[in-house]
Every structure is written in structure tokens, then in C-alpha cells.
Image (cartoon, rainbow, N blue to C red):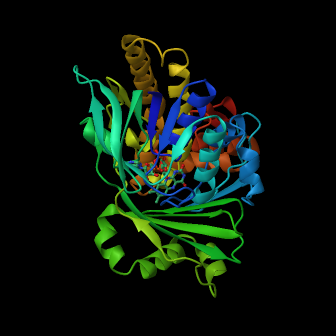
Amino acid sequence: MYDAIVVGARCAGAPSALLLARAGYRVLLLDRSAYGSDTLSTHLVHQPGIAALARWGVLDQIRASGCPPLERTVYEVADIRIDGCAGGVAGQRAKYAPRRRVLDALLVDAAVRAGAEYRERCRVTALLRNRTGRVVGVEGRHRDRHFTEHARLVIGADGMRSTVARLVAAPCTVRHPLMTCAYHTYWHDVPADGVELYERPGAWVAAVRTNDDATLVQAYFPQSRFEEVRTDARRAYEEQIRTTAPSLHERLLGSEPTERLHGTGDQQNFFRQATGPGWVLVGDAGHHKDSVTARGISDAFQQAEALAAELANVLADDPARLDAALARFAETRDATMAPGYQGTLGVARLAPPHEQRLALLRAVRSDPELVATYLDVVAGVVSADALYTPKLLALL
Ligand SMILES: Cc1cc2nc3c(=O)[nH]c(=O)nc-3n(C[C@H](O)[C@H](O)[C@H](O)COP(=O)(O)OP(=O)(O)OC[C@H]3O[C@@H](n4cnc5c(N)ncnc54)[C@H](O)[C@@H]3O)c2cc1C
């Protein structure tokens, strides 16, 4: 009997297992994929996520993997260029963009060091329930063998297409249509300055340095163009960079990407019911949004910490207290994630920027302190209200 079984061992699942194991609980961490495998992502972790990695003792290993700190952000829209550094949080001013095969493996290692039991290539296919219908465990296949395991709590950290969410029939409580499609690949010998962001109506392009001296370049398109874009994704990708980020495009000329193009047209926007008797969803399983604002990893970390805090003294307790703690987690999740969700939907429309927003950016660009606060808003360190200081209002 485990205290918790965590299904999915990446940005939501591995930290959940790590924190619960550190709290003294008996934790089983499962993933159908192999240890150290890659997954579709552009890797950018904002400062709140970096601060979490530092708290968990994983940041030094990210640095040791050769992943460079990204202190500076350059953002171009219309005739405006914002160039500066965020204020950051908890002493972390830099973002990082580690390859997921690096980040996810280091998180699993930390969970295992904390005492969690980890099984790779282990697919959950069904949930076990007691007489009252409460979830009390999982069953599935580990490599080629059928298995069942029991636990007080099953944590679905199994991503946007969550099996746990499907098996408990967790409904979506908020849902919006698909908004973008996105393609990326990696380039060598293409120097990029920290994080580079380029926006124009119908387009968004980002460049970040990652492991192996590579620069990841990502291009976003409206979802309405997905069928057309996917017929010749390489051509559409290069054209989007040329027209949206000409200075970056020039640096790519003469280079060849080091990997095939990776892309998706399925980035759903939803909140699912977060919990029920004996189960809870964390990370993308419970709440997913377009990746254009690169919030998913930091948000998964934040949810793992919020869940572990609620479970601190109740996981081995009677089910009613456990369910009450899970309900508090659900409430916190919805309240904490809502502003970032709304902000992401706003960016993912890829609509022409409002004149009001351009006026704000023109005011911000001239002052390093305002630039730092603006970049903190983008990173989710502070809310947008923090920007409206007397200094900014005087410039508007
Ligand atoms: C194109 C793209 C770019 C992105 N870029 C960024 C970015 O730059 N920054 C950022 O913060 N976020 C980004 N995101 C979002 C980010 O990748 C996710 O928010 C993050 O991976 C969520 O982590 P997770 O652990 O919840 O889910 P996942 O990373 O999806 O992990 C779920 C795990 O569950 C496992 N699993 C699934 N079903 C089962 C089962 N039945 N049994 C056992 N295991 C199972 C899977 O194998 C997987 O390993 C991007 C997403 C996309 C699609």
C-alpha cells in the first residue's frame, strides 16, 4: 500500500513525488515512457520555475548540464524594441531552457533520491475502486507484465491527454478553442541573445539557447492556418521567421537545423475538475493552455508545490480530511492559474496589438526599471497591476 501513486514522471509528476517523498510519504512514480526521453516542448522555464528548481536542489545540475542562463530578453513588436532583464524572484533573475530529456531526468533523479520508487515504461490502463467507488489504486502494464498497485491517493500527472482524467471522467470546467499551431527545431552556430521574442499580427517567433550549444527557434501560426502550414511546414516555418524576425532569419541563413521540425496543432485550452474521491490531477492533466507564453512547466511546478503543501499532514489521515485538502488544492489551482490562462489566450489570438498596448510598451522601453517589471509580468513573477506605478502613469 502506497500513500500516493503518481502517474506521469515529468514536470508535474516528478516534483509531486519528490515533495511527497521528502514529507515522509511512501510514493510510487510511474511513467509509460523511458527515463530520460524527450517530449514536445520549447523548454523555456521562467524565473518562478527556476526558483522552484533552486529550492528543490536541482538548479545546480541544470547548470552543470551546460544549459546557459538566459538573463536578457529582447522583444520586438511593431516599431518597438524592449531590451532588458527581469527583476526576477528569490534571487533568480535568469530563465533557463533545458532540453526536456535533461530536465525531466534530473527531476526523476531528485524524486528517487528523496525516496520515491520509480518505474519507467509502466503504463496505467485502469483505476482500482473500493465499494463506495473511491479510487484506491491503479492497474496497467509494466514492460510486458500486468500489475496492480494500491494507494490512498492516485495523482494524475499524465499530461493534456490524461488517462487518469479519462478514467475518472473529469469534466472540463472551462474550455476555449484551439488558437495556434507551432513548429520548432534546433540550430547550431546561430548566436541568440538570451530570450528573443518577435510578434506581428498572425505570427509569433521565439529563440532560446538550450543544451548542446544549440538555439531553439519556434514559430507560431494561427490555428486557422494549420492544414495549410502542415503541408509544407519547413517552408512555412522559414517564411514565418523571415517575415516576423528578419534579424534572426539572417543569422539562420547558411545553417541547417540539427533535427527535424517538431510541431503540433493540438494545444488545448481548458481547466478540468481537479479532484474527486481518491484522485487529483496536476500539471497539464488538469489545466492546459497554449504554449505561446511558455507557462506550462513553471505552472506544473507551482501546482506540485501547492498539492504537497495541502497534503503535508493529511495523506495518511482519514479520507474525509484528505478530500478536504484536495478540494482546497483545487480552489487554489483555479485561482492561481486563472490570470496566466487569460493572459495566454490574449497572446495566442495572434491579433494585431491594440494601440493602448503599444503606448504602454513605448513608455516601458525607455526605462530599465519599467522594463524589468514588464518582464516580471511576462514571467508570471508579478501581476500586471504592478506595472502601473506613478512613473509609468506619468509616461503614458
Ligand atoms: C510545442 C510546445 C511547446 C512548449 N513550450 C513550453 C515552454 O517553452 N515552456 C513551458 O513552461 N512549457 C512549454 N510547453 C508546455 C509544457 O511542455 C507542459 O506544460 C509540461 O510538459 C507539463 O508537464 P506535465 O508533467 O503536466 O505533462 P507532460 O510533460 O505531458 O508529462 C506527462 C507524462 O505522463 C506520461 N503518461 C501519460 N499517460 C500515461 C499512462 N497512462 N501511464 C503512465 N504514464 C503516462 C507521459 O508519458 C508523460 O511522460 C510546451 C508545450 C508544447 C506542446
In terms of depth relative to the viewer, which is nearer, 139 or 162?
A: 139
Instruction: Where is residue 13? Give x, y as percent.
Output: 50, 41
Which quadrant, please, contains the C terminus? top right
At 31% from the left and 31% from the top, the residue drawn is 273
Determine the image quadrant of residue 217: bottom right
In terms of depth relative to the viewer, which is nearer, 236 or 23?
A: 23
Q: Using the image, determine if residue 298 lies above or below residue 235.
A: above
At 45% from the left and 51% from the top, the residue drawn is 347
Q: Using the image, determine if residue 67 lies above or below residue 343.
A: below
Q: Residue furthest front?
A: 145
In terms of depth relative to the viewer, which is nearer, 300 or 361?
A: 300
Determine the image quadrant of residue 229: bottom left
Instruction: Where is residue 48? Give x, y as percent.
Output: 63, 38
- Residue 295 can be seen in this image: no
Determine the image quadrant of residue 111: top right
Which quadrant, please, contains the N terminus? top left
At 73% from the left and 33% from the top, the residue drawn is 90
At 68% from the left and 36% from the top, the residue drawn is 56
Instruction: Where is residue 17? Give x, y as percent.
Output: 54, 35
**Left or right: 258 as drawn, with respect to 285:** right
Q: Using the image, determine if residue 106 lies above or below residue 262.
A: above
- Residue 231 can be seen in this image: yes
Instruction: Where is residue 196? Give x, y as percent.
Output: 63, 61
